[in-house]
Amino acid sequence: MNLIDLSNKTILITGASAGIGQGTAKLISELGARIFITGRDIERLKKTFDSLSGTGHQILPADLSEEKGIEILTKELPELDGIVHSAGVIKPFPVKFIGKKHIDEVFDINLFAPVLLTSAVLKSKKLKAGASMIFLSSISSQHPYQGGALYTSSKAAIEAYCRAVAQEYAHKKIRANCISPGLVKTAMFKETMNAMTEEKRATYAEKYPLGYGEVKDVASAIAFFLSDASRWITGANLQMDGGLSINHL
């Protein structure tokens, strides 16, 4: 018996053109889900689409930083069994140089987009009873780093929002959970590592007793939260950091 069975489930994945969103789309399609993928880059979305197993999937390009984009996307959606909010941006800004435009650049995608999209699908009754919402946070909300004030703040905010959604919609059996990964081997990770000295890369690696994460590690956790195997879990925040937190206890 496969406990992580997503057959007959319809799932929306934001940020599906790369990284964790892309890996999640591939994995949950293998588990039987029908998937709607969205993002701004249509060419990269097509690459994700071509990697999916099964049939019935659809590309819905949208700019989630604009309310109009969210409105159009919501109208095109069918009833959903789940949403994976994986769209996100990382833009480093030193604290003393942060301005309103920098806040907008990060918060528009990392916080406002998932909040407004959640409101839109709930108001339009596009989320079924028993549905599951997953919000991608980051271990950095608990372990800040230089230049990451806006990114870490946006992730701390989405964790608080997720708990509020879980509390407000539990009576409808709609679940909301967060996943907070540490460093995961995505294209962005490779760019970050390449910009570091060999000494600094070695220092970072020592902080992860189980090594850096793979995209499939996070995608597997997302699949669990989308499945009925997690039916008794809501308002949780799963930290996936390869043991990084052990060194901060």
Image (tube, rainbow, N blue to C red):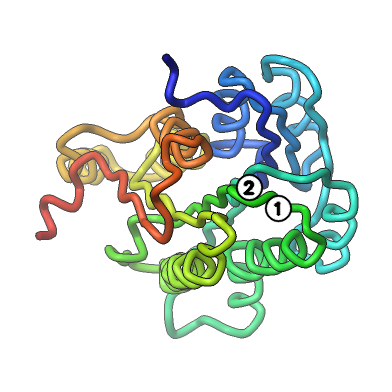
Q: Nearer the viewer, mark 2 or mark 1?
A: 1
Residue to which mark 2 is pinned: 83
Labelled pair 2, 1 in contact (Cβ < 8 Å): yes
**Residue at left offset 78%, top offset 67%:** 123
x and y percent of residue 246 in the render?
12, 50
Q: Amino acid at mark 2?
A: Ile
Quadrant including the N terminus: top left
The one of 173 and 196 positioned closer to us in this rendering: 173
Quadrant including the C terminus: bottom left
Does residue 133 appear to the left or right of 224 in the view shown?
right
Does residue 206 appear to the left or right of 220 in the view shown?
left
x and y percent of residue 48 in the render?
70, 27
Element carrying mark 2: strand
The alpha-carbon separation of the residues under discs 2 and 1 comes to 9 Å
**Residue at left offset 75%, top offset 43%:** 38
Q: Residue 169's image quarter?
A: bottom right
The one of 127 and 84 positioned closer to us in this rendering: 127
Q: Is residue 211 above or below residue 125?
A: above
Element carrying mark 1: strand
Label 2 packing within 10 angstroms: few (<14), some (14-19), many (20+): many
x and y percent of residue 128 in the render?
69, 49
N-term-proximal mark, 2 vs 1: 2
Does residue 57 appear to the left or right of 107 in the view shown?
right
Q: Residue furthest front?
A: 171
**Residue at left offset 67%, top offset 62%:** 118
Q: Is residue 39 above or below residue 162?
A: above
The circle on residue 127 is 1
Label 1 packing within 10 angstroms: few (<14), some (14-19), many (20+): many
**Residue at left offset 86%, top offset 62%:** 71
Q: Residue 101's image quarter?
A: bottom right
